[in-house]
Image (tube, rainbow, N blue to C red):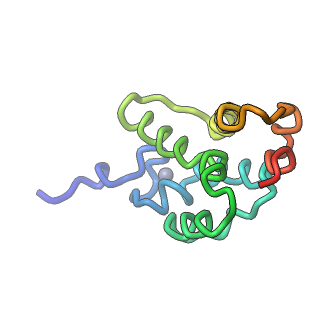
């Protein structure tokens, strides 16, 4: 009887009970991913205690739609679901690279008149596009 602890654990690390903050921010996988994104974007993304705090921060910034895409919130959730439902692992480094490519594709499709140098984008997306 009772709740099986394994059902509550994060499917990615199997170390902690999964809640939104753990899944999106504090899991080792997510933490590594955000570290890469922080460095790439030149943003300090390490101080969020909750995902709600992160969303509030994004809402207060200009260009928030683009930032959401660049920041790769979707890919963290896709990775978690891939592990849980399809038993597919993706390293945070691969997820980071995929985020760089996906966000560039998204920006190019949204702003067809912009000429974006992929090499500069990969170095720093906010240098390439002023928001
Ligand atoms: Zn975890």
Q: Quadrant of the C terminus?
A: bottom right
Q: Residue at the location (48% across, 59% down)?
A: 22
Left or right relative to 82: residue 108: right
Q: Residue at the location (84% across, 46% down)?
A: 124
Q: Residue at the location (69% across, 62% down)?
A: 62
Closer-to-camera residue (109/46) = 109
Residue 1, quarter of the rendered image: bottom left
Count of labels in the image: 0
Residue 96, quarter of the rendered image: top right
Q: Residue at the location (46% across, 42% down)?
A: 80
Left or right relative to 31: residue 113: right
Q: Residue furthest left?
A: 1
Q: Does 58 appear above or below 128? A: below
Left or right relative to 94: residue 53: left
Q: Residue furthest front?
A: 113
Percent of width and height locating residue 102: 64, 33
Percent of width and height locating residue 60: 63, 69
Percent of width and height locating residue 35: 71, 53
Q: Does 117 appear above or below 128? A: above
Left or right relative to 4: residue 81: right
């Amino acid at each position: 009887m009772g709740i099986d602890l394994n059902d509550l654990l994060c499917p990615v690390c199997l170390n902690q009970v999964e809640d939104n903050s753990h899944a999106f921010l504090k899991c080792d996988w997510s933490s590594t991913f955000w570290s890469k994104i922080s460095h790439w974007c030149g943003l300090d993304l390490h101080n969020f205690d909750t995902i709600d705090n992160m969303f509030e921060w994004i809402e207060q910034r200009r260009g928030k739609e683009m930032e959401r895409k660049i920041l790769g919130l979707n890919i963290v959730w896709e990775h978690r679901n891939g592990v849980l439902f399809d038993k597919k692992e993706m390293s945070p480094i691969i997820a980071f690279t995929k985020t760089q490519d996906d966000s560039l594709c998204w920006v190019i499709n949204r702003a067809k008149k912009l000429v974006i140098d992929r090499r500069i984008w990969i170095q720093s997306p906010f240098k390439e596009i002023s928001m």
